[in-house]
Image: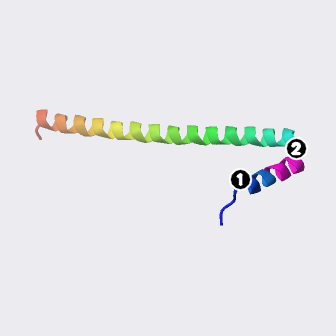
Amino acid sequence: MSIGPTELIIILVIVLLLFGVGRITKIGKEMGTGIREFRKGLQGDEKEQAEKEQKEKQETTNSSSGNDTNPS
């Protein structure tokens, strides 16, 4: 029970008639901008996470090397 190519063409023609070419291109542009911003947000989160992990590794390395040279 899948949608075939004929049904897709009919749906696209109906959508074109209802909204018109101008509004469809505007909607497509807005969706593209939204998806682009969403991806940028995800990449920013991944970068922040990687930086946080790198700082934790450096702090761990610094604290362990500091303990070896300065016994208490």
Q: Identify the image quadrant of the N terminus.
A: bottom right
Q: Toward the viewer: 11 or 36?
A: 11
Look at the image and give the residue range highlighted in magenta: 12-19
Residue 13 circle label: none
Residue sitting at 86 percent across and 38 percent down?
22
Which residue is located at x 29 percent, y 39 percent? 57
Q: Residue at x 53, y 42 (%)?
A: 42
In x, y percent, where is residue 34?
67, 42
Relative to 50, residue 10 above or below: below
- 10 Å crowding of disc 1: few (<14), some (14-19), many (20+): few
Magenta region's main secondary structure? helix
Res 5 label: 1
Q: Is residue 68 magenta?
A: no
Q: Position of residue 43 (x, y in %)?
A: 51, 38
Q: Nearer the viewer, residue 11 or 46?
A: 11
**SS category of the residue bearing label 2:** helix
Q: Position of residue 17 (x, y in %)?
A: 89, 48
Q: Amino acid at mark 2?
A: Gly
Residue to which mark 2 is pinned: 20
